[in-house]
Amino acid sequence: MFVARSIAADHRDLIHDVSFDFHGRRMATCSSDQSVKVWDKSENGDWHCTASWKTHSGSVWRVTWAHPEFGQVLASCSFDRTAAVWEEIVGESNDKLRGQSHWVKRTTLVDSRTSVTDVKFAPKHMGLMLATCSADGVVRIYEAPDVMNLSQWSLQHEISCKLSCSCISWNPSSSRAHSPMIAVGSDDNSPNILAKVQIYEYNENTRKYAKAEALMTVSDPVHDIAFAPNLGRSFHILAVATKDVRIFTLKPLRKELTSSGGLTKFEIHIVAQFDNHNSQVWRVSWNITGTVLASSGDDGCVRLWKANYMDNWKCTGILKGNGSPVNGSSQQGIFNASLGSANTSLQNSLNGSSASRADTKLTGVTLVFCCLLHAHRNGKRSPFSPSPAPFDLSQDTSSLLTTKYCSQSLFKTRCVRFLPAQFDTDGTPDRKIFGEASCLEKTINNPPKTQNFHQNIFLKACKIKR
């Protein structure tokens, strides 16, 4: 059961941004009081402020976490025209602050001449890179050449967007078929500027970022923008927060149809548009599988959106500012917003029309999830034993999935995490999308000697649109 808890943030002014780390166990908040606070989740699910410090000389608009592969690193941006990078240092055994941590400013990025409105770390496969955008319409991309020395950052790219920038989002796809891409949103109120969302792509020929697309249908000020995690899709999904919630798909066209400059051209469709907030929408955020979108607006509610097997997006849950459900929204909708949503969506895929039989040879890029699959078709055993039950979200959902639903007869080696595995056309697993190797990857590499065991059994999880 989902339990909402209020947190006395003790910020002395408006809170502008809340950011969770990769594992969802740490949280950072920033405010107009010029400070950033870091919160850690305890064993009983309570959040405790473990650090608070003044970061800038103006309102702090955004705060973001780097991937934990690079350590405990934060970036913040402010009205004072700067962005800053912070690293957590843990006191050593001979230190007065033995075992305690404190945050150290590693660098200040001072290239902007106006307010820095957003800051985002690039996906980890690109290395330690950081993008900022400013009110003067410039996106800057920095790189730390030495991840062990965060005091040195070099400005790699400057992108002039020719309109005031309010938010940015990296495309998280790690596929070699997709060039690095960044989406930029604008809150410019000028009526003569129609496209308030622009897509920039890295061009290997010129080694620069260039505008690949503009979403002409977004003409209202944009407050937030977010690419969905791309776990095996051949297209991209982009959420936009403006006067309503909008979800777009960007399908790359064939190479012969791309522009002469080498940039990818996209077939763009708006697949959902919701005005349920009846007010300005300020934030949009995807879950880790890119299947559930959360949005927050001036109506004081957080709304959860999910597509069914017919690709129709619907609201699956609503939370008021005090954490209580609205209009009979179910706890199932709340559950779907967590990592546990993988369980529900895969169950639906197994039982519904989206499940399909695959050939024994793995073809294309197929997304498959370990454990939540019918590993035997003879009816004698199934990894679903007992039947799925609600998870306690205060525990590690991934570990619960692994413990409850992985058949020990199939998976001789206990999986360290419940994660997807991605396969290329030759059937060779990509080593890791993120985190540790999944039990499926281990099993495919070392198939157990079990009757009726075939690789194609694992491809009945969910059918990804191609």
Image (cartoon, rainbow, N blue to C red):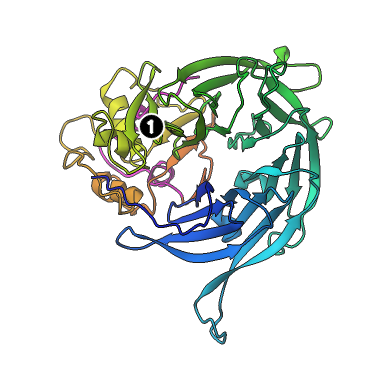
Percent of width and height locating residue 127: 67, 49
Q: Is residue 318 visible?
A: yes
Question: Which amino acid type corresponds to the residue marked 1 in the rendered image?
Answer: Leu
Say left or right for 232 vs 46.
Answer: right
- Confirm whether the magenta stretch covers residue 244: no
Say left or right for 230 vs 107.
Answer: left
Q: Secondary structure at mark 1?
A: strand
Percent of width and height locating residue 447: 37, 43
Q: What residue is disc 1 on? A: 304
Quadrant in the rendering for residue 254 = top right
When the figure is inspected, residue 348 is found, relative to residue 407, above or below; the finding is: above
Quadrant in the rendering for residue 317 = top left
Q: Nearer the viewer, residue 452 or 110?
A: 110
When the figure is inspected, residue 431 is found, relative to residue 301, above or below; the finding is: below
When the figure is inspected, residue 74 is found, relative to residue 175, above or below; the finding is: below
Percent of width and height locating residue 49: 45, 63
Q: Nearer the viewer, residue 310 or 327?
A: 327
Q: Mark 1 Cα within 10 Å, few/some/many (few <14, many 20+)?
A: many
Q: Is residue 145 visible?
A: no
User: Which residue is depicted at the point 29% across and 50% down?
Assistant: 400
Q: How many marks?
A: 1
- Confirm whether the magenta stretch covers residue 457: yes
Percent of width and height locating residue 247: 50, 23
User: Which residue is depicted at the point 80% across and 40% down?
Assistant: 157
The quadrant of the rendering that contains the N terminus is top left
When the figure is inspected, residue 250 is found, relative to residue 206, above or below; the finding is: above
User: Which residue is depicted at the point 60% across and 28% down?
Assistant: 222
Furthest-front residue in this view: 12
User: Which residue is depicted at the point 63% across and 36% down?
Assistant: 167
Quadrant in the rendering for residue 449 = top left
Image: magenta residue range: 437-466
Say left or right for 325 vs 220.
Answer: left
